[in-house]
Amino acid sequence: MIRNALVDGSLVDIDTAGGLIVAIVPASGGFHAGDIDAYGKRVTAGLWDEHVHIRSWAQMLDRADLLPADGPDAVVEILRKHPTRGAEPIIGHGLRYALWTEAPRIADLDAVSRDVPVLAFSMDVHSVWINTAAAEKYGVAHLTGNSGIVREHDAFRLLTLMSDIPDAEMDALIERAARDARANGIVGIASFEMESLTDWDRRVANGFDIIRVDASLYPDRIFEAYERELHAGDVVAGPVSMGYLKIITDGSINTKTAYMHEPFCGTDIVGGLNTDETELERLVRDARAHGITPALHAIGDRANTVVIDAFEKVGVTGRIEHAQMVRPDDVARMARLGLTASIQPAHAVDDRDVADVLWCERTDYAYPMRSFLDAGVPVIFGSDAPVAPLDPWHTIRMATNRTADNRPAWHPEEALTFEEALRCSQRSTVAVGQPAELISLTADGELAAVL
């Protein structure tokens, strides 16, 4: 029993059993052994992070933070100081080079090491800057040119290779990351890691039960769900359920690979599709036939048009991951088709300077939130960790403030209220029959306790 909980302005006691809320009654003032006292604080549903790359996030503590770097020399300096482990690769994350005055060169990273692979992943992980040793070891020397930049599918392959550590070591890192998330009020995540359902089978068999997980699969592994006859939401093992079919439709803004109706400003670059339209439609049709919900990555406005077209042709609903630039007529189509916008508010703040330069006069329909809600599009929030911190309170602040520094809010017309942002971070409510996954908040809307 949770005693003295403030719910909808009234003090109540909340009785739970079997992981569900079974009764909500006026607070009695009584207290028994095993009860939890909410001390009159507001009690609400626990939070979900709807977009996490859990393996990558779990490894972040061992990687160099490149976010402060404003040019090649700064990256080299950070990586030179980063602790090394013999011949193991030197890895950094958080690279933002779209607005650098000096272009990356493979020779710069050779100055960090000529013998050990050096890999500097971009913040959005759609590209990676590598040295000659890495290019030769991982078979991508033909792609690097003078820059050392590898993009999209080839960058994803290198990211996966860097995550290829012993299962026991990886599982321990993921358990630590899950405990940190739980302590921050997160009760569940949608995992979009490039891994197998058998990884979660193993973790649950070894005792993983910290948070709920929707384990999603990419096209090269979706057969695992089809062979098991798993539908969306079916239990995989323990607290792990079948998630989504994740398809990466286009690239990102920082790498100029997002698929655009019009070129990136000052260029003739329009990006492109990582999955062509015919294949995209086939994958969505197969997912519908097997009862799996598609979750389609789309950044550029043309990519969003393409994925909305695919959903409409197949006649199925689903999620658009990121939905960073969506034309107003496509917002209306999303609402009509019942599509969900799975967005990451921190990206709007982190990318504002790049967007102002590369998307120039078109940012009035970039990173929409208010526009989605006003149009009737369901909105759910995630972090895209490790692209942004796996911290739901940071996500909520970015949705409400639209700035992370002393500058005015960026496109404040798209900001949400705290209550709206909170609801976009929850899957349940405080009601009989709902999950008993609850948190309490201070009067200022900060996390008080995980109940």
Image (cartoon, rainbow, N blue to C red):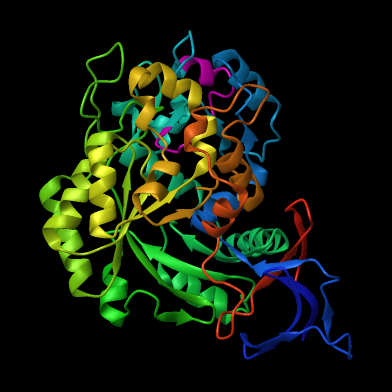
The residue drawn where x is 29% and y is 27% is 142
Residue 119 visible to the viewer: no
Q: Is residue 410 visible?
A: yes
Give the vertical position of 74 relative to 451 (above or below): above
Q: Measuring 34% from the left and 18% from the top, which residue is drawn there?
A: 361
Q: Which residue lies furthest to the top in this view?
A: 101
Residue 77 is situated, as x and y percent measured from the top left of the image, at 66, 19
From what the image shows, is residue 159 above or below residue 437? Answer: above
Residue 445 rendering spot, x and y as whole percentages = 72, 53
Question: Is residue 16 found left or right of 342 in the rendered image?
Answer: right
Looking at the image, residue 192 sits to the left or right of residue 394; the answer is: left
Q: Does the magenta stretch include residue 25?
A: no
Q: Residue at left 60%, top 20%?
A: 76
x, y percent for residue 122: 48, 32
Left-right relation of 15 to 349 = right
The foreground one among 118 and 317 is: 317
Q: What residue span does the magenta drawing correspond to?
A: 107-127
Measured as percent of width and height from the top left, residue 404 is found at 63, 31
